[in-house]
């Protein structure tokens, strides 16, 4: 996902490939464009690519982006979350300029061409003073607004989907001023990198998150990655004769050198700990570790685990899991 080279064209207007030099005096203010809680049930998968050359650089001087990415991707952790329905919201008041609906969710993953419709199902809103927002990859049949309609901040536009050039359920939000993309975290192109939480053009500061863990859970055998991505629930009970006790972890935006640290503790002094190097950077990643049952089996009772993603000696993501064995 991170290596894909494309930008999202406007539904009507072509978009420039460079950031606007600076936000105007009549700068827009944006609310969160998705009905979720960042860091809990959604996360930012990709930021705007601020490197004008062949390299990549997000506003924090990290690599949570890809070549030519002109927006911010607000992602859901699983397809199950998408199917449950998460609303896409107008980030600012304005007038709907264009909509598109009817594009299938998952078409790109199925090998179908989405040329010219990379945004999938989407909405474009004009906010005045040259400002425009575009909302992409909405769920087919979910769009609730029409061209010419006036919307307020927070008006539901549709649901997060997987249409167009999308490999995971997310909302791609592009902000433009006079046709040129603007990074809402650092609106002036010349500004230095920072990882400090700041408002930028957001109503409230959003934290810079360079990766982390989405979920962790127990199983008695190595789980299928596809099942985890689709939202298979974590096991809460395992049989007393389980042949192994495995902890899996699912996360986003790993980089080479990251370490996944897992610790499992349970009855009768049981303790298992392991550190697993992450071999390469991945937009989404999945790892698991565990222990085979000892002679006589595992002791019955609750087992608790902690999974941590460690980068340069600092923990950047933590998830906990609990399972009852033989209960």
Image: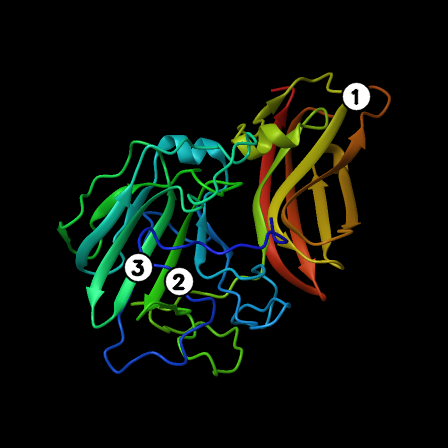
Question: What number is the disc on residue 194?
Answer: none
* Front-most of residues 195 and 126: 126
Residue 133, horizontal then vertical, whole percent: 30, 59
Secondary-structure class at tag 1: loop
CA gap, disc 2 and disc 1: 61 Å
Q: Are marks 3 and 1 in contact (CB under 8 Å)?
A: no
Indicate the quadrant where residue 270 lies: top right
Determine the image quadrant of residue 173: bottom left
Q: How is the image coloured?
A: rainbow
Does label 3 or label 1 sit earlier along the sequence?
A: 3
Task: Identify the residue under disc 1.
Answer: 297
Q: Say which element carries label 2.
A: loop
Residue 214 image offset from top left, x and y in percent? 55, 45
How far apart marks 3 and 1 lie (CA) works out to 58 Å
Residue depicted at x 64% and y 41%: 249
x 56%, y 60%: residue = 65
Q: According to the image, label 3 marks what residue?
A: 133
Q: Which residue is mark 2?
A: 15
Q: Position of residue 290 (x, y in %)?
A: 76, 35
Residue nearest the viewer, comparing 297 with 179:
179
User: Residue 152 placed where, x, y %?
Assistant: 16, 56
Marks 3 and 2, Cα distance to the nearest angstrom?
12 Å
Q: Quadrant of the C terminus?
A: top right
- The answer to which of marks 3 and 2 sits earlier in the sequence is 2
């Amino acid at each position: 996902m991170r290596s894909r080279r494309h930008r999202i064209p406007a539904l009507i207007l072509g978009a420039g490939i460079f950031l606007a030099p600076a936000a105007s005096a009549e700068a827009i203010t944006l609310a969160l464009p998705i009905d979720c809680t960042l860091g809990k049930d959604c996360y930012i998968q990709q930021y705007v690519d601020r490197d004008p050359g062949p390299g990549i650089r997000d506003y924090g001087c990290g690599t949570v982006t890809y070549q030519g990415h002109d927006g911010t991707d607000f992602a859901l952790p699983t397809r199950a979350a998408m199917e449950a329905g998460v609303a896409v919201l107008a980030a600012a008041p304005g007038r709907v300029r264009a909509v598109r609906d009817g594009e299938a969710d998952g078409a790109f993953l199925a090998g179908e061409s989405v040329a010219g419709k990379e945004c999938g199902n989407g909405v474009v809103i004009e906010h005045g003073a040259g400002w425009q927002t575009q909302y992409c990859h909405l769920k087919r049949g979910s769009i609730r607004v029409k061209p010419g309609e006036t919307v307020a901040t927070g008006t539901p536009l549709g649901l997060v989907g997987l249409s167009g050039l999308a490999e995971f359920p997310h909302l791609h939000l592009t902000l433009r001023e006079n046709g040129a993309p603007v990074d809402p975290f650092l609106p002036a192109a010349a500004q230095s990198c920072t990882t400090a939480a700041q408002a930028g053009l957001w109503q409230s500061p959003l934290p810079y998150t360079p990766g982390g863990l989405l979920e962790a859970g127990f199983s008695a055998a190595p789980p299928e990655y596809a099942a985890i991505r689709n939202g298979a629930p974590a096991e809460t009970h395992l049989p007393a004769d389980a042949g192994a006790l495995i902890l899996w972890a699912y996360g986003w935006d790993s980089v080479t050198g990251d370490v996944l640290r897992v610790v499992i503790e349970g009855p009768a002094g049981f303790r298992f700990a392991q550190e697993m190097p992450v071999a390469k950077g991945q937009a989404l990643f999945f790892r698991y570790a565990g222990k085979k049952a000892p002679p006589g089996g595992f002791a019955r009772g609750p087992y608790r685990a902690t999974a941590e993603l460690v980068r340069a000696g600092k923990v950047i993501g933590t998830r906990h899991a609990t399972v009852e064995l033989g209960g």
